[in-house]
Image: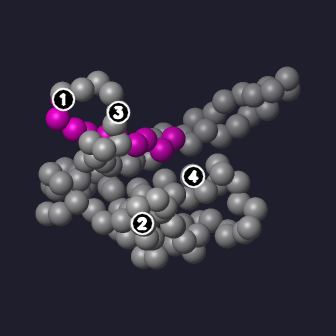
Amino acid sequence: MAEPTLQQIFGANAIQDATTITITKADLPRLTASPTNTAESLLTAILLKAQDGLPQSTFDTNLDQSIYIALGFPGFAFRGTNNDSYRVDQITVNLAKPDISATIDPDDY
């Protein structure tokens, strides 16, 4: 099998050149596209989209896939002076490479 493509991970309209990557907001699941989307909402939508293209099931069978994304278990945290209850959802990004360095280097994946 081949390494997942840019479009498989980031959407049909994703493109890159030597200095930029462009991801179309319409390709991102559950995101309401707006000129004022927060950085956190964009990152969440990118991770959810990447999860579709990088599931553990294909990681297990495709040796060219080095990353898989999985949802964890939801929990709760209490924050602020009033100890308000917050739902905490987990998205786990798993990076696999030959065991030659303990440093995460994007060029290895």
Residue of label 3: 104
Residue 11 visible from this viewpoint = no
Please tell me whether mark 3 or mark 2 is closer to you in this view.
2
Q: Do the residues bearing badges 4 and 1 touch, measured as CB atoms within 8 Å?
A: no
Q: What type is the residue that disc 1 sits on? A: Asp
Across and down, in percent, residue 85 comes to 74, 34
User: What separation in Å lies between label 4 and label 2 (alpha carbons)?
Assistant: 21 Å
Residue of label 2: 17
Q: Which mark is residue 12?
A: none
Q: Is residue 100 magenta?
A: no
Q: What type is the residue that disc 2 sits on? A: Asp
Q: Which residues are magenta?
A: 90-99
**What count of labels does the image hold?**
4
Q: Which mark is residue 43?
A: 4
Near-viewer residue (98 or 55): 98
Q: Residue at x 19, y 50 (%)?
A: 60
- Marked residue nearer the N-terminal end (3 or 2): 2
Across and down, in percent, residue 107 comes to 30, 44
User: What separation in Å lies between label 4 and label 1 (alpha carbons)?
Assistant: 28 Å
Q: Quadrant of residue 97?
A: top left
Q: Residue at x 76, y 62 (%)?
A: 36
- Marked residue nearer the N-terminal end (3 or 4): 4
Q: Residue at x 17, y 35 (%)?
A: 98
Q: Which mark is residue 99?
A: 1
